[in-house]
Image (cartoon, grey):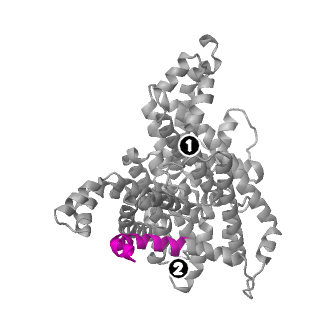
Amino acid sequence: MTWLKKYRLEALLLAPLLLYILGFTVYPIFQTITMSFLDRFTGALTLANYREIIGKVEFKSALFNTVAFALLSLTLEMVTAIVIALILKRRFFGRGFLRAMLMVPMGVPTLVSGVAMTYIFSIHGYLNELLYRLNIIELPVDWASGGLRTLMMVSLADMWKVTPMVILILLAGLESIQDEVYEAASIDGATAWQTFRNITLPLLKPYITMAIILRAIDAFRVFELVLVLAGRATPVLSTFAYDEYNNYGNAYTSAAASTILLVIIMIFIYGYLKVGGSEEVSG
Amino acid sequence: MRGRDLSRKISDSLYLPVALLAAMAMVIPVYILFKVSVSTPGEILTAHPSFLIRDFTLEHWVKVLKSGNLKAPFVKSFAVATLTTVAAVLIASPAAYVIARMPRKIKYPLVLSLFLTRMFPEVGIALPISVQFIKMNLIDTYLGLVLAHLILNLPFAAWILVGTFETIPKDLEEAAMVDGAGKVESLIKVIMPLALPGIAVAAIFVWLNSWNEFTYALYLTVSQRTLPLQTYYYVVRGGWFDAATYATILTIPVMVVTFFLQRYMKGGYLSGAVKG
């Protein structure tokens, strides 16, 4: 106990934070997991909650939508972010302007970005109007009608909001690559593609890993964007869990849905780190 | 060899158009939001809405400002964000200081686990908390929402502040202690003033996170709505112009602060950040 005596002050300063996280994050999650295995009325251990939600059509569609949305938006965001980060690494007139524009979506709350997107994607919205004026479509497209189209819409909305942050992460990575490496490649006569494929991409990998994990976590948990844009037509696991509790008053099935979501997130992170190598996730 | 490098030709000729397109794409949704809030219904609620603002009108703004529905949510959002910020700074900065001074072997797992609290789905945390808060009569209260907002903001603030304290040399406090200051005194008089700029930035981000926060507010509110919930309320009711106006009001402080804090918006720095 001499250790505790010596570090009494440190323990005292650290305790509130750790206790808060234990009490308000770890314990609630533990409660949710427990609740998902309890019978609603008797409190006995059961798998009934899982059986009940798995039997629901909305759940199957929520499960599919969650995974599909995460993969779709991650792909779109990473590809776009790499392209724009590479552009921002060039020196050109208007570079500062483009960089400043990146701040615009970052200064918009997620909920508000959803609201703005409803004006763009509604039946008589601006996207349809643009496509109409460009003579691409004649009749308006109903983007919120469900299926792949709606997933695409939510992904684009999400992409608008978060790609700037991914760009900043990747840009930090690009700036960490030393110019000598590129000079050497250019002396060896590497093409731009070869340089990108064999130098930039491998050296950027830790940053890509960090961006993917960050984005994947948020993409799996997507909530307000779907609530605002797609409503109940296209549920994801978060909105399904919310619906079960708030509109059907069943905390136990809601807990089961949340638990499944947590498991999916953990599997993704574990799987990605396994496959993608074991670099340190650096800040 | 060089002359036949197609990939270079493509990137050299396309990067400017792509950059221009990207810059436009980033601004247009904000423009449209603002446009809807200052347009006449005839301009928006038609099969072919106009892209430019034709009939500028402040009727929706005047209506929202005069309706008396703005003040209560605004005050609640403002008060909750401010209280959350004060509590987050008070709890997170001493803890972040201790973590920053720990040996690497303990520090990194600790910082990583702070980060990994993000992995938990918010709907999974909000559920038992809402059940509990109903029993404790904390629904619709400032206190309840502040407690909930600390869940996401404490790890976030601690994450940023560990970085801040790491940049303050240990020699300084050792020197203070040699001069006879106690641990607490050197912390308050030497370290904290030096960390103040970092603490200020963390505080501003926490304030914004709380100001924007939607999920916990949705779970913990029945009637006393925050500003984001008020916005959502009009979205659900199909009140396009009210929603656009409320959304713009909600955005203004975030946009202003983001603009002034540009240099802190770095990838690594924000990697602990909750969606803005």
Q: As rendered, which of B168 and B205 lies closer to the eye?
A: B168
What residue is shown at x 59% (from left), y 23% (from top)? B11
- Relative to A97, does residue B260 appear above or below in the rendering? below
- Main SS class of the magenta portion in the image: helix
Label 2 belongs to which residue?
B139
Expressed as whole percent of the image width and height from the top left, the position of residue B247 reads 51, 57
**Which amino acid is tagged 2?**
Ile
**Which amino acid is tagged 1?**
Pro
User: Callout 2: few (<14), some (14-19), or many (20+) C-alpha neighbours within 10 Å?
Assistant: many
Q: Could one spot residue A47 in this view of the protein?
A: yes
Expressed as whole percent of the image width and height from the top left, the position of residue B46 reads 65, 48
What residue is shown at x 54% (from left), y 71% (from top)? A25
Expressed as whole percent of the image width and height from the top left, the position of residue B63 reads 47, 62
Please, which residue is most extreme toward the bottom here? A42
In the image, B205: left or right of A67?
left
What residue is shown at x 37% (from left), y 64% (from top)? B98
Q: Secondary structure at mark 1?
A: helix
Chain ID, mark 2:
B
- Give the magenta part as a residue range: A1-25
Image quadrant where residue A235 sits: bottom right
Magenta span has A21?
yes
Q: As rendered, which of B240 and B78 lies closer to the eye?
A: B78
Q: Secondary structure at mark 2?
A: loop
Q: As rendered, which of B253 and A282 lies closer to the eye?
A: A282
Q: Could one spot residue B56 in this view of the protein?
A: no
Label 1 belongs to which residue?
A206
